[in-house]
Image: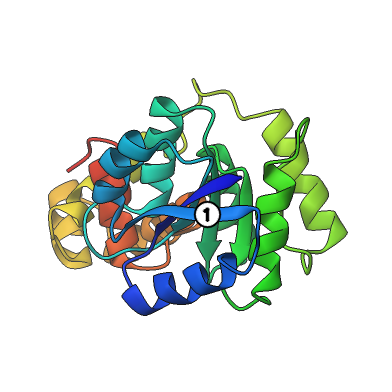
């Protein structure tokens, strides 16, 4: 029996996934949580075999941060991330956080079932990736996962770090330019590079990244 925990801020989504999984004789949903913050203590209490984790939740830490912490506390628990974003940067961040699989929310519901079976197979050593993903993207992601970037190399330059810190503090581009004695256009360029490098989709993502890295 595979014990499963669901983490999603939408009750109706959790209910739908629960109904889907309960059709499988081998699956048992043992716990639910509605935020990344709640997911950690609930998982520690129930020790699920698999956690289905939403990536973007409005309250508390996001799914990627929650996955990283959960994997530190429960290394034997497999985390499958549910996301609307299929771009390379986002999926790479999920895998680097320790996700055992990634399922796109616009895929067939059977993909969730297939992912759970795959990650819980004995000897499974590669993450489950969406079946619609191109072979070239799959190969790039798996290659980088096997040869991670040297952690001693910072993702952001010192100037980009300064810009992101001010963004997280609520400064607009003009104010950042004045404080750093650079042009507004230069601030915009730095901002665009930061967004690309960390895979951000919104200002909230920028602030979340800054908070998680102690830049606020």
**Residue behind mark 1:** 28
Relative to 202, is 167 on the left or the right?
left
Judged from this view, the residue extending furthest toward the top is 152
Judged from this view, the residue extending furthest toward the right is 135
Would you identify the image quadrant in which residue 87 lies? bottom right
Give coordinates of residue 127: x percent, y percent.
70, 44
Q: Which of 121 and 163 is in front in this view?
A: 121
Position of the C terminus by quadrant: top left
Give coordinates of residue 207: x percent, y percent.
25, 55
Relative to 82, is 171 on the left or the right?
left
Display colour scheme:
rainbow
Question: Where 65 falls versus 20 (above or below)?
Answer: above
Position of the N terminus by quadrant: top right
SS for callout 1: strand
Q: Nearer the viewer, residue 118 or 137?
A: 118
Q: Which of 198 and 70 is in front in this view?
A: 70
């Amino acid at each position: 029996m595979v014990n499963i925990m669901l983490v999603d801020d939408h009750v109706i989504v959790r209910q739908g996934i629960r109904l889907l999984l309960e059709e499988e004789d081998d699956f048992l949903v043992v716990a639910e949580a509605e935020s990344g913050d709640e997911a950690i203590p609930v998982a520690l209490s129930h020790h699920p075999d698999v956690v289905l984790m939403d990536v973007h939740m409005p309250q508390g830490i996001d799914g990627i941060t929650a996955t990283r912490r959960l994997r530190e506390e429960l290394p034997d628990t497999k985390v499958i991330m549910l996301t609307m974003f299929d771009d390379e940067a986002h999926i790479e961040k999920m895998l680097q956080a320790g996700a055992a699989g990634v399922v796109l929310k616009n895929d067939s519901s059977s993909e969730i079932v297939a992912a759970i079976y795959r990650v819980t197979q004995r000897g499974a050593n590669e993450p489950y990736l969406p079946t619609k993903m191109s072979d070239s993207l799959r190969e790039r992601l798996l290659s980088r996962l096997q040869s991670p970037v040297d952690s001693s190399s910072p993702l952001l330059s010192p100037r980009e770090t300064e810009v992101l810190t001010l963004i997280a503090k609520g400064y607009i581009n003009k104010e950042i330019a004045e404080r750093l004695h650079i042009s507004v256009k230069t601030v915009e360029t730095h901002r665009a590079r930061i967004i690309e490098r960390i895979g951000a989709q919104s200002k909230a993502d920028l602030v979340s990244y800054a908070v998680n890295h102690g830049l606020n």
